[in-house]
Amino acid sequence: MTRIGSAVVDGVPCVVVVDAAGTTVRPTDIVPDLGAALSGDLLDDAVSTALAAPSLPIDEVVWRPTIPRPPKILCVGLNYRLHVEESASIASAAGHPTIFTRFPSSHVGHLQALVAPSASDTFDYEGEVGVVIGRPGRHIRADDAMEHVIGLTPFMDGSVREFQRHTSQFTPGKNFDDSGSFGPWMTTLDEIEDLDAVTVTTRVDGEQVQHAPLAELITSIPDLIAYCSTFTTLEPGDVIATGTPGGVGIARDPQLLLRAGMTVEVEVSGVGTLRNPVIAES
């Protein structure tokens, strides 16, 4: 398997398999999205059906989030040392990963508009690697953790800093409607040769503002899965956003915050590139 996403083709929600060049897709509507394929143990059927379908130019699809309505979206804060240093005003539980949640309504798909909220002018970017869970588990050992991962996806954890910092709880600043995104697709783990060498790069209007390999994570992906599965059962279709590198807009001098008319890109090497324009809330 390789690149698999959730999209709409001719008004019909479907799963699409993307060709190696990233120029065509093959759709199947036997399930409406990748989340349904994973939760129903129908991913192999969906992929084989799609591969037998005629191909379409990739610009004929409308992208949804990789998993449109994940059972859980668990996000990790302060998981790169440079970001910890630039975020000194945010409290951290030393020795344990900082975990918060996002709601499905806070996400859009590839090429869909991110909405800069009218309530605050502190809308910031955070490029991340998203981990998609393919096999359920509780109390998963770190040594076994990657057996529960089906793939990786680019993730943009858009953050309204003013609301994030109202209290020690991040939830309000991380859940404005249409403030984050992930996609365009999931690349299955069997296509990733060296997980530590995978890099995340964020660009705003074409300028690189973040870049780091997964090797620099403070808490690794296996350890994140072990930790999260201690307090909750991980289910197929769950997404874990692994944290953002240093270089966020609020910490820059001068600050670089998202405004209508800007474009944000998150590229995960060997996985794909997520691109979203920014519009103002109407």
Image (cartoon, rainbow, N blue to C red):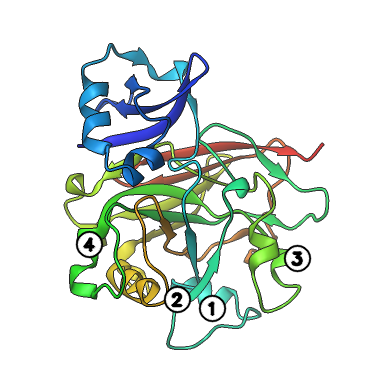
Q: In the figure, 51 relative to 129: above or below? A: above
> Which of disc 1 and disc 4 is earlier in sequence?
1
Residue, disc 2: 81
Q: Is 238 or 280 nearer to us in this picture?
A: 238
Give the CA separation, mark 1 to mark 2: 6 Å
Q: Is 25 or 233 nearer to us in this picture?
A: 233
Q: Nearer the viewer, mark 3 or mark 4?
A: 4
Q: In the figure, 144 relative to 203: above or below? A: below
Quarter of image, res 17: top left
Q: Is residue 2 visible?
A: no
Residue, disc 3: 162
Label pair 1/2, CB-CB below 8 angstroms? yes
Taking the spot 74% from the left edge, 65% from the top edge, the residue there is 163
Give the CA separation, mark 2 to mark 3: 22 Å
Q: Amino acid type of disc 3?
A: Glu
Residue, disc 1: 85
Give the CA separation, mark 4 to mark 2: 24 Å
Q: Amino acid type of disc 2?
A: Arg
Q: Secondary structure at mark 3?
A: helix
Residue, disc 4: 146
Q: Is 149 or 210 nearer to us in this picture?
A: 149
Question: Looking at the figure, which quarter contains the C terminus?
Answer: top right
> Which of disc 4 and disc 3 is earlier in sequence?
4
Q: How many marks?
A: 4
Give the CA separation, mark 1 to mark 3: 19 Å
Label pair 3/4, CB-CB below 8 angstroms? no
Q: Amino acid type of disc 4?
A: Met
